[in-house]
Amino acid sequence: QVQLEESGGGVVQAGGSLRLSCVTSGRSFSAAPMGWFRQAPGKDREFVARINWSATSTHYSDSVKDRFTISRDNAKDTLYLQMNNLEPEDTGRYYCNFLKSLTVPSEYWGQGTQVTVSS
């Protein structure tokens, strides 16, 4: 059974930082490209960032580029998202997932972690 467990969310003021973590189990993590997604209230879930299996390649949505950094620890089956200079528009529930292609997630989803940025 594939499990994804996100953590690290919280309430932060604009300009602040948070570091999200995602622990996975039930599927090979070290060989899989991974991604972060988010869903704001009333909006569809959107792609945020991706990283290849070896952490040699990353890609970000335009809205978070230069502010967020995706990373991974294959020895711990854990994915990270360092979020700096947060903006109110970053508010939403954040999810990690395995990727089927560049920005297409697998069918597995965890509960996500809530990020709220106040102005």
Image: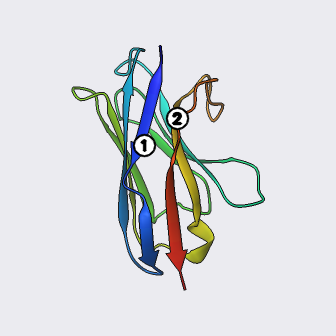
Q: Residue at x 39, y 17 (%)?
A: 31
In x, y percent, where is residue 53? 39, 26
Mark 2 and mark 1 lie on one chain; the one further toward the N terminus is 1
> Which label is found at residue 6?
1
Q: Residue at x 45, y 65 (%)?
A: 67
In x, y percent, where is residue 32? 44, 21
The crowding category of the residue bearing disc 2, from other C-alpha atoms within 10 Å (few below 14, some 14 to 19, many at least 20), is some
In x, y percent, where is residue 2? 47, 18
Query: Could you say which is closer to the camera, residue 49 or residue 96?
Result: 96
Judging from the image, what secondary structure is the residue with disc 2 in? loop
Q: In the figure, is residue 49 to the left or right of 7? A: right
Q: What's the amino acid at mark 1? A: Glu
Residue marked by disc 2: 110
Check the picture and name the quadrant holding the C terminus: bottom right
Q: What's the amino acid at mark 2? A: Gly
- Place residue 24 in its image quadrant: top left
